[in-house]
Amino acid sequence: MKERLYLFDTTLRDGAQMNGVDFTVQDKLKIAVLLDDLGVDYVEGGYPGANPTDTELFADERKLNATFTAFGMTRRPGRSASNDPGLVQLLDAKADAVCFVAKSSDYQVRVALETTPEENLASIRDSVRAAKARGREVLVDCEHFFDGYKEKPEYALACAQAAYDEGARWVVLCDTNGGTLPHEVEAIVGAVTARIPGDHVGIHAHNDTEQAVANSLAAVRAGARQIQGTLNGLGERCGNANLISIIPTLKLKGDFAERFEIGVSDGKLKNLAHASRMLDEMLNRAPDRHAPYVGESAFTTKAGIHASAIAKDPKTYEHVAPETVGNRRKLLVSDQAGRSNVLSELERIGLTVNKDDPRVGRLLEEVKAREARGYAYEAADASFELLARRMLGRVPNYFDVTRFDVTVEQRINAKYERVTVTMAVVKVKVGDEELISAAEGNGPVNALDLALRKDLGKYQRFIGGLKLTDYRVRILDGGTEAVTRVLIESEDETGERWITVGVSENIIDASFQALMDSIVYKLVKSGAPA
């Protein structure tokens, strides 16, 4: 029987420490659902009381299958658990579990906390006891554990033992400064699991020596049974252990797959690349093309001996099948490889075309030309599907936008406040009928979106549940006249979501392209008649 390994995600808390990362409450909720759907066991939402976002996040119960976890400090030195406002607020949070951070280095206790080793141990005991009394599952992150163990092993072990003896479900060993190497992690975790059962021990690794994933796996080999990490390795300084790399390694590599099981099913593993890219899109940053398992280049090979071998058998140059993690194989440069890639994508979206059809070659050239101009069809499958359908003659001409006008006016309102008002007017031809719609919105794109969807005549019933859920802008080269790429995420009444893309030197024009694709895609999917 396989042993169970538990995954603890701290993207929303430790990941938010990375420079340039700033989550709203809605961002956190969306990511929490993404993690829950993937099969992660614990989702650490943040630090209630530390900032308004996290306080709001924990004001209401979140219905997740994962254990929703609040992070906070043990009681302050010199205070009782009931007389520490931070601890009281943490225990009042609507969370399934509480994760305390506690110093486990004698040096850190004396220098950073400015208290005694004995008082720190008492703080750990009192905090765990208080959380247990409130019915919470308790985790204790033993901060600076590995550095503390190297300096004074008995004290580091005493901190971990105190947490376990008071009933902490998990005692998590943290390589806080990220300087410990895999062989050291394996030896030290082994020493801990000789005293504390491994199914109560976790690992929290930072990536300052590019060893966070290796250190996490080393800890598992030594007996730890919980791994903490983040999506795409987000985290302070150089980041945390990357769960996007750890999860498929545990699932697909024999040393781990044969011994352990995790909450991520084979089916959910196929959503891994999507989860990684969704996070990058939310952060408005380009995905790492060379990321293991999920990067665009992870299964990409240029023409030559490697590509020739892959065409015969992909196992010749692939360590796992890309489909298992939701990625795709790409053979670059050669026309044959490009044609095969397009045919594979057409098959994926349900378009059957003969491999010798000349339209496939024309589609390939059009995709290459458009991507050279800045289009990103990897992130906008709906726009690619429409492009393919149009070139194959399979998209009806539902309507034509013959003209649109967007105005932005700044004025003083009746309350003598300076306000900015945006209005869009759209002229649409549906068959022989001409329709004009106008709408005000929060900015030009919102106004244009509302005006476009206000009245499409006989097609209005098909788009009644359509709404724009996300809008991302990326400047592709510098300067005020730079080319702009717009990605728009839409959702319909069934909950289905899709992304469309537009590219132009004019941000309104790029937005209009993406909006038009979104509406037409909905009409195609709904089977709207021509």
Image (cartoon, helix red, strand yellow):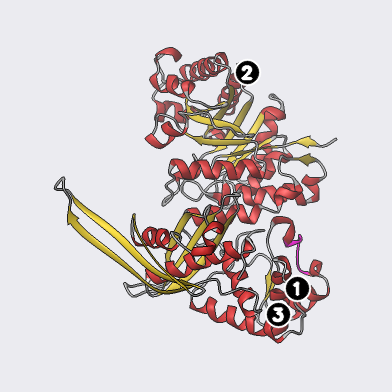
The residue tagged with tag 3: helix, strand or loop? Answer: helix
Whichever of labels 1 and 3 marks the residue nearer the N terminus, that label is 3
Please name which of the two marks, 1 or 3, marks the residue nearer to the observer: 1
- Label 2: which residue? 167
The amino acid marked with disc number 2 is Gly
Q: Residue furthest right?
A: 1
Whichever of labels 2 and 3 marks the residue nearer the N terminus, that label is 2
Q: Is residue 60 visible?
A: yes
Assess disc 1: are there few (<14), some (14-19) or many (≥20) residues with their C-alpha within 10 Å of its C-alpha.
few
Instruction: Give how far across and how far down residue 287 sits, in percent.
Output: 54, 61
The residue tagged with tag 2: helix, strand or loop? Answer: loop
The residue tagged with tag 1: helix, strand or loop? Answer: loop
Chain part drawn in magenta:
317-322
Q: Nearer the viewer, residue 461 or 300?
A: 461
- Label 1: which residue? 352
Instruction: Give how far across and how far down residue 117 sits, in percent.
Output: 48, 20
How far apart are the two marked residues, 2 and 3, measured between alpha carbons?
A: 60 Å
Residue 339: mark in rendering: 3
